[in-house]
């Protein structure tokens, strides 16, 4: 072989070597992130999820790819979104919000699923057992539904003369709405309270809800859990003050935004833990053997400024027992 031909041949091999090497590199794992709300309204929760993922050594775009699916409050889109992630054969599905978790579970029995949900996952049928989930699903629950009666109790303690209360739920989030209603009905009955259950599945229906609250002469409102409420806490807080409806929410940010009270967990912590579990699954752990994590710390926050504006006296005893007072 002549020298020029040899150099040309060697150069051709060298030119193709990087392509061959790159082709042999393993593809990055893919996390399918599905959520019933919007990226804008869940920015803080998403940041917490990515933080948890980062604690396990995974950074989106560096050594993992996150495929996002946001339903923007249209829960009927979730089954198709979950099916698309399954079709794409993602490594693990991070199914956040209760509707997202239900849709993901219905879509696959083989791809690992890590959920973040606001109610008992055993009752929802997501897992068989909290300590030994079995199957392909595990995750984190804030048990927001189970403490719905406690929120009614606190609101009634603040409004001891109240006779008529209301619960606000999202009917599009059927499993969560039914569970919250079931939990609070007996609690209202035991306290001799008349309870109205009102529905709002999107922001456009909020004004109609508050008009109905006025018509029904409701003394206080328990705001349900769910993405449509968590994503619009500032608007809801403003409406409760404008219409003079004493309201308690599960979300601390509601009280921070000017709402009267909140009692519940920080959803950002649940999302961080979901990110940690997603990272553990990516490292090879079996979701069937990862116990479902539960929120254990519930904070009670009272906005004294709002209470004063609504003409409500917060007793020294309640102030002493609350975890945080906003003045």
Image: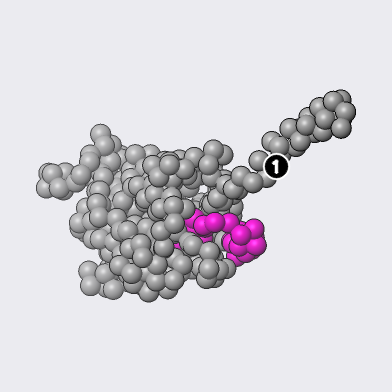
Report the front residue among 7 and 216: 7
Residue 251 screen position, x and y as percent:
35, 49
Residue positioned 78% across, 29% down in the render: 11
- Quadrant position of the C terminus in the picture: top left
Image coords of residue 319 (percent x, y) = 16, 44
The N terminus sits in image quarter: top right
From the viewer's perspective, tell me whether residue 82 is left or right of residue 142: right
* Residue 92 visible at all: yes
Between 152 and 40, which is closer to the camera in this rendering? 40
Q: State the residue at coordinates (40%, 67%).
A: 288
In front here: 305 or 297?
297
Within 10 Å of the Cα at label 1, are there few (<14), some (14-19), or many (20+) other Cα atoms? few
Asked whether residue 197 appears in the rendered view, the answer is no
Give, as a single range, the part of the protein colored magenta. 78-100
Question: In the shown orientation, is residue 77 left or right of residue 163?
Answer: right
- Using residue 135 as the reference point, say whether residue 218 is left or right of it: left
Furthest residue to the front?
Answer: 1
Q: Is label 1 in a helix, a strand or a loop?
A: helix
Judging by the rendered image, the residue that carries numbered circle 1 is 20
Q: Residue at x 57, y 68 (%)?
A: 107
198 relative to 143 in the view: left or right: right
* Colour scheme in use: one colour
Q: How many marks?
A: 1
Percent of width and height locating residue 294: 30, 58
Residue 139 is situated, as x and y percent measured from the top left of the image, at 40, 59
When the figure is inspected, residue 249 is found, relative to residue 178, above or below; the finding is: above
Residue 40 in the image: above or below residue 295: above
Q: Is residue 209 above or below residue 252?
A: below
The quadrant where residue 55 appears? top left
Is 93 covered by the magenta stretch? yes
Q: Residue at x 88, y 28 (%)?
A: 2
62 to 214, vertically: above or below: above
């Amino acid at each position: 072989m002549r020298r020029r031909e040899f150099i040309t041949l060697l150069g051709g091999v060298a030119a193709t070597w990087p392509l061959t090497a790159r082709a042999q590199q393993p593809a990055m794992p893919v996390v399918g992130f599905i959520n019933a709300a919007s990226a804008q309204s869940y920015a803080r929760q998403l940041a917490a999820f990515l933080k948890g993922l980062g604690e396990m050594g995974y950074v989106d775009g560096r050594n993992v790819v996150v495929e996002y699916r946001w339903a923007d409050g249209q829960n009927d889109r979730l089954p198709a979104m979950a099916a698309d992630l399954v079709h794409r054969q993602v490594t693990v599905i991070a199914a956040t919000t209760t509707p997202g978790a239900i849709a993901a579970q219905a879509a696959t029995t083989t791809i690992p699923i890590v959920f973040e949900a606001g109610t008992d996952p055993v009752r929802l049928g997501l897992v068989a057992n909290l300590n030994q989930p079995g199957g392909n699903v595990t995750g984190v629950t804030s048990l927001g539904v189970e403490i719905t009666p406690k929120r009614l109790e606190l609101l009634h303690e603040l409004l001891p003369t109240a006779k008529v209360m209301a619960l606000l739920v999202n009917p599009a989030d059927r499993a969560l709405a039914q569970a919250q209603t079931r939990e609070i009905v007996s609690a209202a009955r035991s306290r001799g309270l008349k309870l109205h259950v009102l529905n709002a599945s999107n922001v456009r229906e909020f004004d109609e809800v508050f008009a109905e609250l006025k018509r029904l002469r409701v003394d206080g409102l328990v705001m349900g859990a769910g993405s449509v409420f968590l994503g619009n806490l500032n608007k809801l807080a403003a409406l409760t003050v404008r219409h003079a409806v004493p309201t308690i929410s599960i979300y601390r940010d509601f009280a921070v935004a000017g709402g009267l009270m909140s009692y519940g967990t920080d959803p950002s912590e649940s999302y961080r833990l979901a990110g940690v579990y997603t990272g553990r699954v990516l490292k090879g752990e079996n979701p069937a053997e990862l116990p479902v994590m539960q929120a254990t710390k519930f904070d009670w926050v009272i906005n004294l400024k709002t209470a004063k504006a609504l003409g409500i006296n917060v007793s020294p005893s309640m102030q002493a027992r609350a975890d945080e007072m906003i003045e």
